[in-house]
Amino acid sequence: MLESYVTPILMSYVNRYIKNLKPSDLQLSLWGGDVVLSKLELKLDVLEQELKLPFTFLSGHIHELRIHVPWTKLGSEPVVITINTMECILKLKDGIQDDHESCGSNSTNRSTTENTKSLVKPRRTIQQAAPTDPDLPPGYVQSLIRRVVNNVNIVINNLILKYVEDDIVLSVNITSAECYTVGELWDRAFMDISATDLVLRKVINFSDCTVCLDKRNASGKIEFYQDPLLYKCSFRTRLHFTYDNLNSKMPSVIKIHTLVESLKLSITDQQLPMFIRIMQLGIALYYGEIGNFKDGETEDPTCHNKDMLGNITGADDETRIDMQYPAQYKGQELYSQQEDEQPQGWVSWAWSFVPAIVSYDDGEEDFLGNDPTSTTHQQKAQILRDPIVSIGFYCTKATVTFKLTEMQAESSYYSPQKVKSKEVLCWEQEGTTVEALMMGEPFFDCQIGFVGCRALCLKGIMGVKDFEENMNRSETEACFFICGENLSMKGLTYLTNSLFDYRSPENNGTRAEFILDATHHKETYTEIAGMQRFGAFYMDYLYTMENISGKGSTNQDFSSGKSEDMGTVQEKSTKSLVIGPLDFRLDSSAVHRILKMIVCALEHEYEPYSGLKPDIKDENETILNPEEVASLEEYIPTRHTSVTLLKCTCTIFMAEFNLLDHLLPVIMGEKNSSNFLNTTNFQSLRPLPSIQILVDKINLEHSVPMYAEQLVHVVSSLTQPSDNLLHYCYAHCYLKIFGFQAGLTSLDCRGSYCLPVPIIPSFSTALYGKLLKLPTCWTKRSQIAITEGIFELPNLTIQATRAQTLLLQAIYQSWSHIGNVSSLSVNEALMNEVFQTIALSLILSLI
């Protein structure tokens, strides 16, 4: 019977994650074709063991689970799994901030060896549990199971995820999420994989996604709710799996791309510190700054330094020297390495839901009559090869609105307080792309770009009604930052080679080719190519790790038998950022809104996830022999960052109002209890003088050793370190500015600028500086410079008449004088003398 093969597969996943299920009742219901289970509790310990994330589940339950199995049409209709109302609450593990694992599930403290063995290969248990039916040929059963698994539809209605930390409550609510199999045109279809088409396509549609970020009090109660960060946003995800052959158990290429047509974010002044906190959590997790130690372990600085030196220099009588650092120090660039006996982690857990094409068990090949020797060899080759994974996020138009809130009490004494918000700043962005390409540990690349963006002032701020509706000010005056191009003019270049691009190889029946070589990558993805695709902003982060066998020290110790000891690993990390033509207008409205955001971001008492370690010099210094020093000098991994700004225009206007005394003290770390001024009417000043700065190009390059702490401890212990080793113990910074010029201009009541009056003609300059890493390790070497700088300025000319100097002084005083500066209106005669002089000279030159 078919039920004897399909039922164990479905039962295994249900029973694997849900508590207190009776397999007999579940099996009888499945054979009837429909299963309805209510009020289910998830096995939190199993989820924690398999996810291997630094989070613990506080609760997890499913209101209703429905499974529909069309037994009579299994070959043409999908199995549908429907989950109605699923809610999970999680928090950061206590061991990361307090005494490790003081509360929450105790499953993470237990040994997980037995559980891991039973979870790593669930399909083996499934296949062994399924009885053999002599009436059904093995090939037919195998093909049918493959078709069933590949076409399972999963529907989740009302998915609720909550994350709590300190006073932060982050909740995600998705009204509906549906995953189903599609055909070549991405339409719903019942598909199968064949030898001629080794591709599986799926689509996940998310409807009405709402993200809320609220603050709770000491008792854990939310006193008042903030506006949602994201409200009822819908998006779709396309998944594309490519297999090498029918015997492949895992895809060789995985593409997961998500497209959002419209993304509208809203952040209040109270949400901004919490939002930044969440972003810092993600960065800390990526760089391995939290969750590096096992349960019950604490960091010992002495042992830490000893292990660190041992791994770099081959201490403890080891004669080999290679730049193999411990896994906890590679967390900044690599995925953590795990032994085969250790739990597989969240990536393997996620990939366990990607259907294998053929077999569910290593022993199934014998059942099918295949050669076990050749098949086992093929499987091992496939295991050694990491799949290519491409993850992409694309957004047509995104809007971020910053709001200021104020409390409003109801008329009744017992009525709760309500929060009223007012929009003050808006950021609009078009054609956004975030792409990540990876292949195991040796290769990772992330590219981010967008076509165009702008920032606008909304309504009033700090009691000044500068952009209220009755002011009738134009959108041009409200816009203070413009960068890039318009999406309607640029086209859909941000979707190039994505699953949403009709020209991509996957949408034309061909296999995509990926650049996984660092040299070829840099030649292809240049700054020019990035700006041609986007136009406003382009970032390329590339990390590669290459194992150079046969190079370096020849007396390496391979007694450990680990793969990382079989050669010298060369790591490279480069970040390139390019910002296209931009126009930045700094007037009173823009400056006060930007500084107000900074003040709101600083108003919190959160402790950093990773505290700065004291620079302690290890007394047990390790002395290297000449061979080890020579091996160390062969290659030292570094992180290189390059930032380039093209065609920048910055205009600094005379301040029309100045309330910086309320903002600057908070930014400088002081507490400011003074209240804002009362609401005042805003009177725009026209003509409005300004300083305009033009720069053709700015380039900033920064390099730092990838493992500075380990390197400095080793090099500082040498008697006479070479100049090359000392060079890598510094952080280097090189700033180059081309075509810098400045002048005076004026904005009239029509929004037009007059001809600029040159003050500083065009010139170029360069600045180089370096800073010694961990200076406390070099106390015995006073001759080594801690910092050094070189400034290059071939020529500089400043030219200004008396009238121009007085106007520059008036602009400066408008920002240095606190209060309403309407009384500092510029003398009309002075304005005429400054700007009519240049107009007259231009007319004379034309004559």
Image (cartoon, rainbow, N blue to C red):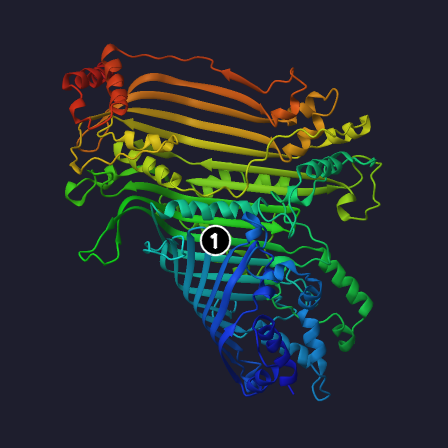
Q: Is residue 738 left or right of residue 565?
A: left
Q: Residues within 10 Å of mark 1 (few under 14, many from 20)?
A: some
The answer to which image quadrant residue 684 occupies is top left
Count of number-bearing discs: 1
Residue 510, position in %: x, y?
Answer: 58, 59
Name the residue at 59% across, 49% down: 291
Residue 595, position in %: x, y?
Answer: 33, 35
Residue marked by disc 1: 393
Name the residue at 43% across, 45% down: 276
Q: Is residue 417 left or right of residue 529?
A: left
Quadrant location of the C terminus in the rendered image: top left
Residue 551, position in %: x, y?
Answer: 78, 37
Name the residue at 64% across, 27% down: 729
Residue 590, position in %: x, y?
Answer: 29, 35
Amino acid type, mark 1: Phe
Name the residue at 60% across, 61% down: 106
Q: Is residue 150 left or right of residue 645?
A: right
The answer to which image quadrant residue 224 occupies is bottom left
